[in-house]
Image (cartoon, rainbow, N blue to C red):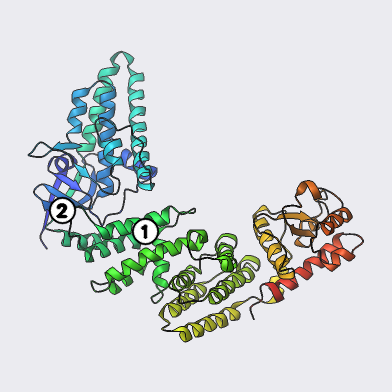
Amino acid sequence: MKIQCIDREVRQILESGIYIVPRFQRPFSWDRNNIEEFWNDATSDVKKDYFIGAFVTYNISSSVYGVVDGQQRLTTITIALCAIRDKYQELGHIAAARGVHRLIETRDLDNHALFVLGTETSYPYLQAKIQSFAKDEEEMEVREEEVALADAYNTLCWYIDSGIAEVSESDPAKSKRATKKWLDQVRDKFLSLKVISITLDNQEDAYTIFETLNTRGKDLTAADLAKNHFLRLLPTKSKSIDLPKDNWQEMQRTLESAARSIQFKTFLHHYWLSKHPFVTEKQLFRSIRNEVTTSNVKDVLSELKIDSKLYRGITEPDFLDLWGKHTLDVKDSLLCITNILNIQIANPLLLAILRLYNAKRLKDGQVRELFGLVERYHYLFTTISALPSSGGVSQMYAAHARDLSNANDSNALGVSIQDFKKKIKERIPSKDVFVSKFKQLTYANARQREVLRYTLWRIAKAKNPALDLERTSGTIEHLAPQASSAPHIHQIGNLLLVPGKFNGEILGAKVFSEKRKLLKAGGYPLEPEIIASANWGEDEIVNRTAALADFAYNQVWSIK
């Protein structure tokens, strides 16, 4: 490996060639704090010959380089020069504006215009909206990277505007000359920033250096490093077509465009746990690097692409084309796990289940049983009993996900499901712990209302399977009116989930006897103790709360 190291200023870097951000690099991701810190360091009067670190590139062709390390800094410097150029232009200093612009856009030997910094992931936004001398006014698709670029540009423009305003106020009579001088100073400070320029011979060396520089760093995630590893093993054969990179970006878009944006690193970790021995997120890349080779990289990437959609379907079941009329309850069970109970620790197992279901290796009843086990366990253990999910639970889910994934036939799948059920049963909380926590559920706590809605719905459907009651559209009603401020009024023993036709206007603040009469007339199946009660006060509410807790533990969420 041949390496050249030279001390350089940023101006020399920008004047010496074209810099391409290669396919294995992550998108621009600096936030406002990063930009502000960089501005303060770069423009400080105290820091002379300010060193901003190493700038690592590799040779692509004559005077064309790929960026290995320093992408975020080089992009920020380019955006800063664009902001300075635009201010020169706004103030009428056209010659100075064009002078800066030649460090942003240059020309090759055939006089073709080329941007000094070339990127793919942010194309065409960076080029059209920031780098171009004349801005493109056409609306463009804006994703996470484009938002970061726009925010960086606006932040730098704000600093420049603030500096210009301060200079103008100090000497209005000499404002134009003073502002030009101040802009010149800011420009020169950015261009005189010091770097160690390290140039490598080829792209293969670049992949190796990129990984070495960042494996122990905190800036790049395992997903960034994995992307580098995959693309190194899948070199592109065409400058115009890069299917591996396109597939990676498609996976990112699938996950990021979810209703609740999903981080790629989280998906990648859970995918890996669903098929391989347990590793922490910190250990993930090393495991990937050891397992993914030239012989299997295409298959792994292909499965990742499919699984990214399935993973999104864990929190968005409607995103998946897997459900029929006879499996709507299965879909809703998954929705309850992830959106009502807010459980993520089981995701490796849920992904393995969906993968096998999608491949038609699991039957409807098996998926129903597996989702039901996860749902019931976490309702008992996490949502109500509020017991902590330790690392042992994470490893349990990963182990059973791996067992399911590695099952060779239907018999092995059946054994794996029974093993999982046995492990779950061993972890359920005691009835005393559950009941004591269940009794603390209260409508007065707004955060518990969705759990209360879910709880009342499951109980009502368990007692009356034919009841036409939708969880999302049902209304929580108080049997004894809410007007009282007594704590027992908001206990679950005083609550019913009723169909939408019994809206607040019908039942309203009516007394218990009138509500009971209207519910019976409307065909709502009231419990015998409600029908038999002459009055509905604290004793009745406390007794019903205890009865519901018992029914919940022994029947609705029981794991037998």
Above or below, comparing residue 434 to residue 506 in the picture: below
Which numbered circle lies on residue 294?
none
| Label 2 crowd bin: few (<14), some (14–19), many (20+), radius 10 Å | some
- State the residue in front, 160 or 442: 442
**Disc on the earlier residue, 2 or 1:** 2
Q: Secondary structure at mark 2?
A: strand
Name above or below for residue 1 compared with residue 409. Answer: above
Q: Where does residue 399 sit, x and y in percent of width and height? A: 46, 78
Q: Amino acid at mark 1?
A: Met
Real-space Cα separation, disc 2 to disc 1, in angstroms: 32 Å
**Outermost residue, top direction?**
173
Tell me which amino acid carries mark 2.
Answer: Ile
Q: Residue placed farthest to the right in the image? A: 534
Q: How far from the left and from the top, in percent, is residue 224?
A: 32, 59
Query: Residue 38 is drawn in which quadrant?
Result: top left
Image coords of residue 240 (percent x, y)? 20, 52
> Of helix, strand and loop, which one carries label 1?
helix
Residue at point 62% right, 76% down? 428
Q: Residue at x 87, y 56 (%)?
A: 517
Q: Which residue is mark 1?
A: 251
* Residue occupied by mark 2: 198
Q: Residue at x 75, y 50 (%)?
A: 503
In terms of image quadrants, where is residue 461?
Answer: bottom right
Marks 2 and 1: which is nearer the front?
1
**Residue at left 47%, top 75%?**
395
